[in-house]
Amino acid sequence: MSARAPLSRVEFIALLAMLFATVAFSIDSMLPALPQIAAELSPDNLNKAQLILTSFVLGMGLGTFFTGPLSDTFGRKPVILAGAALYIVGAAMAFSAQGLEMILVARFVQGLGAAGPRIVGMAIVRDLYSGREMARIMSFVMMVFTLVPAVAPLLGSAVIAVAGWRGIFISFIGFAILSTGWLGLRQPESLPPEARRPLRLSLMWDGVKEMFSHHTVRLAILAQTLCFSLLFMSISVIQPVFDTVFGRADSFAYWFAAIALVSGSASLLNAALVMRFGMRKLASVALGAQVVLSTLMTLIWLSGFFGTDGMFFVFVAWQTTVFFQTGLTLGNLNAITMEPMGHIAGMAASVSGAVATVFGAALAIPVGLAFDGTPLPLSLGIGAASAVAFATMLWMKRVERIYGRD
């Protein structure tokens, strides 16, 4: 650790988890609303409702290009607070929107604002921690963070029951006020004025070139992109699979909560193992296992051996492994990327986050739109993304043997 955290470790982890949870809450609480929104605003093409999720992700990806460099110049807290204000504006726009296209624009604006808490929060962690200790902190953050996907669909369902699907956007406003209010009151600025960088394009370009001159960092960003893509594939398609394939839309929120709660133990496991085995090894094992499991899922579905009822439980078990795997990959890959970039942490968090998010979402969109009433597009897409990510990690191991860790 390079400096002592100004808060107790427990409160610091809880605060960062809530800031990161802005993204999960903004996506997962929308899942129960998709059928209603599709029926009301896009009855001729129900699959288009999935774009409510990916438009948010694309906005967030674009926003990450700017939030990190801005935080390197103006400090971490002002940029997070400004992002939260933009997020609230987007939520208000979506609440009053009368068509799907306007909701997509509003969700894009929301995503731009959500990039502040997500990316600058990561830079705060790097300001205060480094190396495997940073990975350990991120594991605990991700463990708390996973509770939000567990309860978000249930909260979304409750809000819909009381106030309709538009009420979800009011809950977004309340969540943003609560999380950023906590930050403003309790977390001191982590980037002192003497460590800040002028906001000049030449310096930003130098930072980008420095990042991509590192062999390991390049490969870690590629692996992050693929891991985000398989996560976004699952999030985009899981509700239609429950509804259309298995006829279990009414119980979806409860099953999703169970999946998220079980998957959350992956972050605890990672925190326990990362100091011993290292970040790359754990991520590699998780991705290799997912290649095998996704292949089995595809073969079992094609065999028709279990029938629809039995196949439902196979699907739930497989989706649990998909979300479980993220607890062993994303935090570790973030730490690998950020480790050599402590002096430009905001820039590094922005560039890596933007590339991984935008291209991850772009890879997921065709899989979501290819949904054909079966889980096959999802299992094939996740299997392919996992295989390429696993090959990337093997290549990273070889690169580290040749060049070291740059």
Image (tube, rainbow, N blue to C red):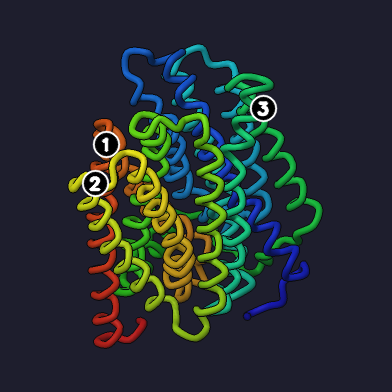
Q: Secondary structure at mark 1?
A: loop
Q: Which residue bears the numbered disc 2?
A: 301
Q: Quadrant of the C terminus?
A: bottom left
Above-or-below relation of 329 to 21: below
Tell me the crowding category of disc 3: few under 14, some 14 to 19, or many 20 or more residues within 10 angstroms, Cα based.
some
Question: Cβ–Cβ below 8 Å for labels 1 and 3?
Answer: no
Q: Residue at x 42, y 67 (%)?
A: 333
Question: Can you tell which mark lies on residue 374?
Answer: 1
Q: Is residue 203 visible?
A: no
Q: Is residue 196 left or right of residue 9?
A: left
Above-or-below relation of 45 to 169: above
Real-space Cα separation, disc 3 to disc 2, in angstroms: 40 Å
Tell which tag, 3 or 2, sits nearer the viewer: 2
Q: Which residue bears the numbered disc 3?
A: 170
Question: Cβ–Cβ below 8 Å for labels 2 and 1?
Answer: yes
Amino acid at circle 1: Thr
Please provide percent x and percent y for residue 275. 52, 83
Real-space Cα separation, disc 2 to disc 1, in angstroms: 9 Å
Q: Residue at x 64, y 36 (%)?
A: 155
Q: Quadrant of the N terminus?
A: bottom right
Nearest to the observer: residue 83 or residue 92:
92
Please provide percent x and percent y for residue 272. 56, 78
Q: Residue at x 27, y 31 (%)?
A: 373
Q: Secondary structure at mark 3?
A: helix
Nearest to the observer: residue 385 or residue 323:
323
- Image quadrant of residue 91? top right
Q: Is residue 286 left or right of residue 345?
A: left
Q: Secondary structure at mark 2?
A: helix
